Image (cartoon, rainbow, N blue to C red):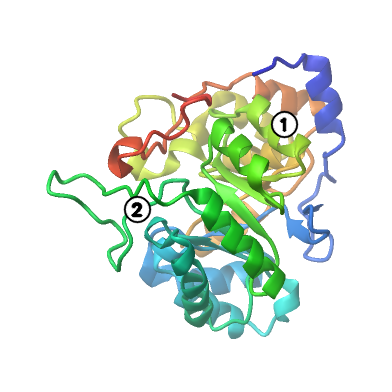
Amino acid sequence: MFARSAAARLSQVSKHVQPTQARSIANATKFKLNTGADIPALGFGTWQDVGSQESAVADALKAGYRHIDTARIYGTEHAVGKAIRESGIDRSEIFLTTKLWNNEQHPDDVEPALDDSLQQLGLDYVDLWLIHWPSPFARGKDPMPKGPDGKIKIDRSIDFIDTWKEMERLQKSGKAKAIGISNFSKAELDRLLDHATIVPAAHQLELHPYLQQPEFTEYNKSKGIHITHYSPFGNQNELYAGKHVTKLIEDPVLTEIGAKYNKSAAQTALAWGIAHGHSVLPKSKTPSRIVANYEGDFKLEPEDVLAIDNIDKKLRFNDSSEAFNYPFFTDLDGK
């Protein structure tokens, strides 16, 4: 990994700062993927709360979101698709991401998995399709297959390179307008790039002011790979309550900087990610919070971005290495 000076980071963030007021739908911040497509900076995540997602996505679309993120394993594709279809918004105006789950990474299973996702969504294509994790589980209907020892069964005969080759073919078919990855280490990314014909359009990672991974994000961008933050509020999720640290959205630096703009710490965390040229994926089922999160697309002055850069704790809240019986993030911050 390489170090970057404060001056270098200031120059970088200055390229991405946005107007101070919350953006209208027409003027919402967007970035270019390596395919030439636009991806909205502010997206809406749909992990958890399966029964609430149809109304949540409908509320998000009404609030102005045009970037929706789902996945096979979330169990929310049907609800997401229904909300999109019934929104009255032209499909071309919505950027939709879904993800290939781990038990369907065998090349023979990849296209049927995408077809099933499209059927669940009730749509003809997705804008972005990701390998959810670089860990191939045993094939079969069980999304979390376990062996006699109670641990997840990893199928070492399945290589994500072969998975990717099949995804490349499906991008060319038009079923997925772009393909990408999630939760890859640097070594795994390098290996993929050594064999890929199509460079991933995006890499979705746990990223927030307490886990910034600046060297790795800049490395991805140097390869033409767009960065998207999941868990942009860090340990706000109750699953991460066991980490004994101040809640990110109560951090005094974020709170103080947010007050300058009449924004919350949560909105400031989103604006920080956007200032670095990344997309961010807040999630909520509460209408007022959905609207508030949409107001996280605003300008932070470069000196405020740098102040937030300085609160990095290299603290990872979502590490599934033990749960998935696979060594994730071995060469990244937060291990």
**In this image, 140 relative to 178: left or right?**
left
Which residue is tagged 2? 137
Instruction: Write down the quadrant of residue 139 in the picture.
Output: bottom left
**x then y, percent, for residue 67:** 66, 63
Tag 2 secondary structure:
loop
> Which sits in the foreground, 213 or 143?
143
Instruction: Write down the quadrant of residue 92 in the picture.
Output: bottom right
Confirm whether residue 127 shows in the render.
no
For the residues marked 1 and 2, what is the alpha-carbon distance in whole angstroms? 30 Å
Q: Amino acid at mark 1?
A: Glu
Which sits earlier in the primary sequence, circle 1 or circle 2? 2
> Which sits in the foreground, 272 or 134?
134
**In this image, 205 relative to 6: left or right?**
left
Residue at 71% across / 69% down in the picture?
172
Residue at 69% across / 21% down in the picture?
307
| Up-down relation of residue 60 to residue 84 (above or below) | above
**In this image, 39 relative to 59: left or right?**
right
What is the residue that sits farthest to the front in this orientation? 157
Residue 259: which numbered mark, if any? Answer: none
Viewer-nearest of labels 1 and 2? Answer: 2
**x then y, percent, for residue 233:** 52, 41
Residue at 52% across / 21% down in the picture?
313
**x then y, percent, for residue 238:** 35, 44
Mark 2: give few (<14), some (14-19) or many (20+) Cα within 10 Å.
many
**x then y, percent, for residue 137:** 34, 53
Quadrant where the C terminus sits is top left
Q: Amino acid at mark 2?
A: Phe
Residue at 76% across / 52% down in the picture?
22
Instruction: Write down the quadrant of residue 216 in the picture.
Output: top right
Confirm whether residue 48 shows in the render.
yes
Which residue is tagged 1? 218
Mark 1: give few (<14), some (14-19) or many (20+) Cα within 10 Å.
some
